[in-house]
Image (spheres, rainbow, N blue to C red):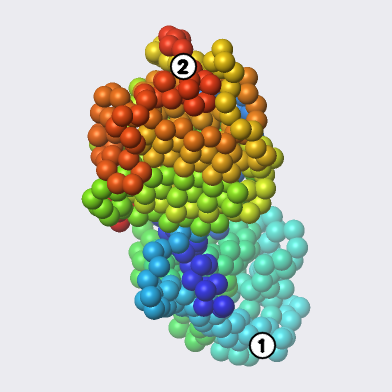
């Protein structure tokens, strides 16, 4: 049971994690490009850029998208440009397919090798997570032990110099100096009330000028709250330990953090040579192993720091243009995913989503999609059984599925690649039991919406609607009256060439099926509101046969219609007491914005 849980957990998390890592990588790349623009400016600006890139790993775009959806205007009017813009952004930021449903593979005897391998990444991540925490716990314990055994310094030149620099730096709470007899690096430890670890025996090695330079460096670590930022990045490293970019960002943070403090010390009037000597003297003395969340004077690449300290180049403060650039970048980082959420909540994008707005969250408990195997003499078949919530399709094209889902026919479908009307698929899907119960209450208006959700998930289908004037038919009751048997509830609707067999179907759903057969939109004007059982059989005319041939449908086999049978128009009138009246009126047309074949099928 644990094995199956881990396998399902990996299948559901892997695409989301891949997309999150990709998005965070894009943010880190953008931050890197901005640091190039600020290479002649102070290190503090570059530090905050790298920190923002690190913290992005803790903030998934999906959260910001959800915020955008929650504040979207409920009656926003969709247009083609925002919808296409959304998908252009989505293709860049979410390149890895993510399924909202559990995919059921074809049944193969024996145990699948993937079923055995799938839990391995989850287990490896957890073991790595524990290993990182264990290593940091050892280092943290060493520092904590040194603090508990240290003696608090209450007087001396170190305290006097520290208090003077605290006033200069605007530190509100005095920083305690703890004299440590354990060989440990000089540095600031703690987040809320940081303390300065002062190794015993280091003071005689530092002259007054050296002492003040070292203390100034540490005070500015406290003022900048570097330990808090380092702890946040430690969380990122623990969770995403497997991603090399995270550790690379950690190196950049330490480098820019130390440079930023170096620059402040020099700006306060410190002599470059004296300051460089003070760092070297501390490095000669200290033997400790630094902890990532301890800010010390000896951090980062020492050789590079010496070059940076001794270089008398002019560092520019951020001007108006640079501040504006940072503001725009920060605004885009937040506004872009929020805007995506707003766009996804508009009617043009969310047709498939709003169709199920009154249904439980998980529509399908299982979905299996695969390429159809050619079987000579087998016509395409589709069956919707709303008694148990199953949908079965054999040898059907995506075009036919879209027509069924949105109740349109050929003339109302525009765009999409060629395989939409040529590639054939076999589909087995099962609705969640709670959805089946809701469908029995809500009748036909939700049936097509559920199939839309399947197409949006498995085929990444996105459409928007436009109005065009097209030939259509009105479905009306014949003068002799309807010949339909009303039943309770919605049950099986079986669809084959020349056959429509129902054990309980609403008339508007039946009209949608007729539109697929006559090649025009069919509008239900019968006034019949219940669910009806019927057995309609006819012989397709030349136009319908041509459409069937384009769908690669065959008329051979046991289900083939009788060649001498009536036409569809005649069968409707004689068998069901209904008729089709030709009309010309504005009709809603679907334009395909995006569609993709399920991974590995085409």
Residue 575, percent across and down? 49, 26
Please tell me which residue is depicted at 51% across the width and 67% down the height of the picture: 8
Q: Can residue 241 be seen in the rendering of this structure?
A: yes
Whole-angstrom CA distance, mark 2 to mark 1, is 88 Å
Please tell me which residue is depicted at 45% across the width and 83% down the height of the picture: 284
Query: Depth-wise, is mark 2 or mark 1 nearer the camera?
Result: 2
Residue 488, percent across and down? 67, 39
Instruction: Report which residue position mark 2 lands on.
Output: 580
The first of marks 2 and 1 along the sequence is: 1
Q: Is residue 323 above or below residue 143?
A: above
Q: Is residue 160 above or below residue 351?
A: below
Please tell me which residue is depicted at 43% across the width and 56% down the height of the picture: 368
Nearer the observer, 185 or 35: 35
Residue 37, percent across and down? 37, 44
Q: Quadrant of residue 499?
A: top left
Instruction: Report which residue position mark 1 lands on.
Output: 145
Circle 2 — which element?
strand
């Amino acid at each position: 049971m644990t094995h199956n849980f881990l396998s399902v957990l990996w299948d559901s998390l892997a695409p989301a994690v891949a997309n999150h890592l990709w998005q965070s990588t894009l943010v880190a790349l953008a931050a890197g490009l901005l640091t190039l623009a600020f290479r002649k400016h102070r290190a503090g600006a570059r530090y905050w850029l790298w920190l923002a890139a690190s913290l992005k790993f803790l903030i998934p775009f999906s959260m910001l998208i959800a915020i955008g959806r929650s504040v979207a205007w409920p009656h926003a009017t969709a247009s083609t440009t925002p919808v296409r813009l959304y998908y252009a952004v989505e293709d860049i930021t979410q390149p890895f397919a993510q399924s909202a449903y559990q995919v059921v593979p074809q049944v193969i005897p024996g145990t699948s090798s993937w079923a055995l391998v799938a839990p391995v990444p989850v287990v490896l991540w957890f073991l790595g997570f524990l290993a990182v925490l264990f290593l940091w716990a050892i280092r943290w314990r060493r520092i904590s032990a040194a603090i508990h055994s240290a003696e608090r310094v209450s007087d001396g030149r170190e305290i006097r110099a520290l208090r003077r620099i605290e006033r200069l730096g605007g530190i509100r709470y005095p920083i305690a100096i703890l004299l440590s007899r354990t060989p440990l690096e000089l540095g600031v430890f703690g987040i809320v009330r940081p303390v300065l670890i002062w190794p015993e025996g280091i003071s005689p090695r530092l002259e007054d000028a050296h002492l003040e330079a070292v203390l100034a460096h540490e005070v500015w670590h406290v003022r900048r709250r570097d330990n808090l930022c380092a702890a946040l990045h430690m969380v990122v490293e623990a969770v995403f330990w497997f991603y090399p970019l995270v550790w690379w960002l950690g190196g950049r943070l330490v480098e820019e953090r130390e440079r930023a403090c170096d620059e402040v010390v020099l700006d306060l009037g410190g002599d470059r040579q004296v300051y460089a000597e003070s760092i070297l003297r501390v490095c000669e003395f200290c033997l400790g192993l630094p902890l990532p969340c301890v800010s010390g004077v000896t951090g980062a690449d020492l050789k590079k720091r010496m070059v940076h300290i001794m270089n008398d180049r002019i560092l520019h403060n951020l001007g108006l243009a640079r501040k504006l650039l940072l503001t725009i970048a920060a605004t885009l980082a937040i506004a872009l995913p929020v805007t995506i959420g707003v766009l996804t909540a508009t009617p043009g994008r969310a047709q498939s989503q709003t169709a199920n707005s009154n249904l439980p969250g998980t529509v399908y408990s299982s979905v299996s999609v695969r390429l159809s195997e050619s079987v000579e003499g087998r016509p395409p078949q589709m069956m919707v059984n709303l008694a148990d919530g199953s949908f079965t399709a054999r040898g059907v094209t995506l075009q036919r599925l879209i027509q069924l889902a949105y109740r349109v026919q050929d003339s109302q479908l525009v765009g999409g690649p060629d395989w939409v009307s040529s590639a054939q698929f076999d589909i087995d899907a099962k609705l969640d039991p709670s959805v089946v119960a809701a469908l029995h209450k809500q009748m036909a208006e939700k049936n097509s919406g559920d199939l839309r959700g399947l197409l949006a998930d498995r085929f990444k289908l996105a459409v928007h609607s436009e109005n065009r004037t097209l030939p259509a038919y009105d479905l009306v009751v014949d003068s002799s009256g309807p010949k339909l048997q009303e039943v309770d509830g919605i049950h099986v609707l079986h669809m084959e060439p020349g056959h429509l067999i129902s054990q309980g179907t609403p008339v508007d759903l039946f009209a949608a099926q007729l539109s697929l057969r006559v090649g025009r939109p069919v509008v239900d004007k019968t006034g019949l509101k219940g669910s009806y059982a019927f057995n309609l059989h006819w012989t397709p005319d030349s136009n319908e046969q041509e459409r069937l041939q384009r769908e690669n449908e065959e008329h051979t086999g046991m289900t083939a219609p009788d060649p001498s049978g009536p036409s569809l128009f005649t069968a409707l009138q004689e068998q069901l007491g209904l008729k089709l009246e030709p009309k010309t009126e504005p009709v809603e047309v679907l334009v395909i914005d995006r569609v993709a074949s399920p991974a590995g099928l085409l």
